[in-house]
Amino acid sequence: MGTFISSEQDGAVAVVTIDNPPMNALSSALLDELEAELDRLDTDPATRAIVLRGGGERAFVAGADIKEFPALREQAAGESGPARGLLKLGHRMDAAHTPFVAAIQGYCLGGGLELAMCCDVRVCADDAKLGQPEIKLGLIPGGGGTQRLPRLVGCGRAMLLNLGGEFIDAATAYEWGLVEKVVPAAEVVAAATGLAATFAARSPHAVSVLRELARSTRDLPLEEGLRREADAFRRCLASEDGREGVAAFIEKREPTFSGR
Ligand SMILES: CCCCCCCCCCCCC[C@H](O)CC(=O)SCCNC(=O)CCNC(=O)[C@H](O)C(C)(C)COP(=O)(O)OP(=O)(O)OC[C@H]1O[C@@H](n2cnc3c(N)ncnc32)[C@H](O)[C@@H]1OP(=O)(O)O
């Protein structure tokens, strides 16, 4: 484990904790550690789903580490720093075979919400606050807040959050489709881990095919997306897990998926 990132195995679910008190701000060093840990877990066959949570109770992640920004300004574009770190992390999560569930408690702001939006599903504490307050700093979101957010909540609501910089509560986030489940704060990690365990019990091959298909077709015309879905369905049908799942149903038994 590193300075900021730790993970615990709960069966086939890895619970990854981001720990940078008091607000789990995403520093460059933290992002490097997080990417390395997610890369290790994504290539570990014993891990079939990953939960991301913030340490402490005040925040999931309250954003990029603002205190790094003055130094960042001096760096040439593309060099190290949260901006580079965020792009690499987002691409790595997008390309993963393993599904991600965000367990959001407290503040989920800026780069923290951008990180949560890189997850497949978001479980949110009922007293959490979410937003993209970068505009209050004279900045704009730089980790997906102008790209992933509109795809989740719609262009108008994304601009409402990005232009206003105000926070929304969990109920609003759920109503807008920004989070998929809202639970009491004390239950958020257990609920996220339970959901991750459901994903972990499914065929790793089908989960991987589904994640790749969803990512690679999200901006394609419907007809092309349907064509690629049909190809992917045929791949799953012919796979070892596809054969096992169908046979298990016909033989009225639980499947044992190999992930191939
Ligand atoms: C493409 C894939 C992306 C993958 C995701 C990875 C993202 C990578 C991140 C880099 C991306 C950059 C782009 C990003 O969009 C930019 C940002 O995130 S900018 C930051 C956005 N966040 C904010 O603006 C929130 C700032 N914080 C606050 O408004 C308040 O702190 C609060 C959260 C409302 C809480 O208020 P209070 O309860 O009053 O507490 P304090 O304000 O006193 O804070 C306590 C303590 O914490 C320090 N702190 C809080 N937030 C940050 C922060 N973001 N960075 C650094 N430090 C922070 C605060 O300064 C206090 O410190 P102290 O004074 O005690 O030393």
Image: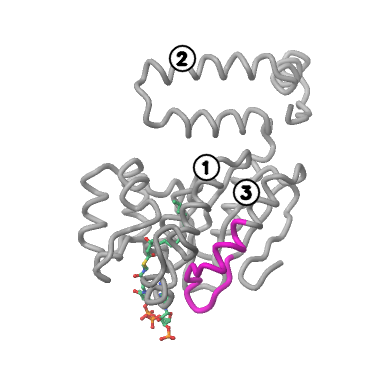
The answer to whether residue 101 is left or right of residue 175 is: right
Residue 63 percent location from the top left of the image: 42, 66
Q: Quadrant of residue 258?
A: top right
Magenta stretch: give its range: 18-35
The residue sitting at 69% across, 50% down in the picture is: 41
Ligand 1 rendered quadrant: bottom left
* Vertical side of 246 occupied by 17: above or below: below
Residue that numbered label 2 is attached to: 227
Q: Earlier in the sequence, mark 2 or mark 3?
A: 3
Query: Any mark on residue 194, and which?
Result: 3
The residue sitting at 63% across, 50% down in the picture is: 50
The answer to whether residue 109 is left or right of residue 53 is: left
Do the CB atoms of the residues marked 2 and 3 lie less than 8 Å apart?
no
Do the CB atoms of the residues marked 2 and 1 lie less than 8 Å apart?
no
Type of the residue with mark 1? Asp
Residue 35 percent location from the top left of the image: 59, 56
